[in-house]
Image (cartoon, rainbow, N blue to C red):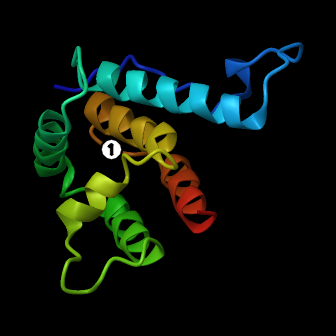
Amino acid sequence: MYNTTVECTYNSTDVFLETDKISEHDKQFVRSCVYRQEILNIFELDEFDQHAINNKISLLYEKMKGETKLKKSIEEVLKKMNIPLNVRNDSFGFLLLFSYDLLYITNECVCEFLNNGKINKNTIKLLENAISSM
């Protein structure tokens, strides 16, 4: 259901060499492709299927919804993305944590939870900081 061995690299400086001579636009395109591949790897899918990904995120939310440290981040991401009050709910907010801007740190939170049963306070702080800087 969730591959906890996947390390997100799409946002890392290691994606490119200092000698790479490509434009920022091309770098963003490459990062976007790597993000899509990493989300497929995380959810153990061979091809992009938004419905399948959303279902897996919903199942994951059911496992993690009791994690109180995550609740604040979910509320913050809903506010930060200007989601109307009538649409806001925790499962939708959890889905937003898998967006391009947040996947790399959300993945760390999920892996910690699935491997240890809890999320480290430092990792949650990184997620909160990532949300506030969006």
Report the front residue among 29 and 53: 29
42 shown above or below 86? above
Q: The disc labelled 1 sits on which kind of residue?
A: Lys
Name the residue located 48 percent from the left edge and 54 percent from the top edge: 124
Q: Residue furthest bottom?
A: 85
Q: Residue furthest right?
A: 19
Element type at mark 1: loop
Residue 41 position, x and y percent, is 33, 19
Name the residue located 14 percent from the left edge and 45 percent from the top edge: 63
The answer to whether residue 43 is left or right of residue 80 is: left
Q: Quadrant of the C terminus?
A: bottom right
Residue 35 position, x and y percent, is 47, 30
Name the residue located 18 percent from the left edge and 31 percent from the top edge: 49
Residue 108 position, x and y percent, is 45, 36
The answer to whether residue 99 is left or right of residue 125 is: left
Name the residue located 33 percent from the left edge and 77 percent from the top edge: 83
How many numbered marks have been drawn onto this rendered protein structure? 1
Report the front residue among 59 and 86: 86
Name the image quarter holding residue 1: top left
Name the image quarter holding residue 107: top left
The answer to whether residue 123 is left or right of residue 133 is: left
Residue 106 position, x and y percent, is 42, 44
Q: Which residue is disc 1 drawn over?
A: 118
5 shown above or below 124? above
Is the residue marked by circle 1 packed among few (<14), some (14-19), or many (20+) residues within 10 Å? some
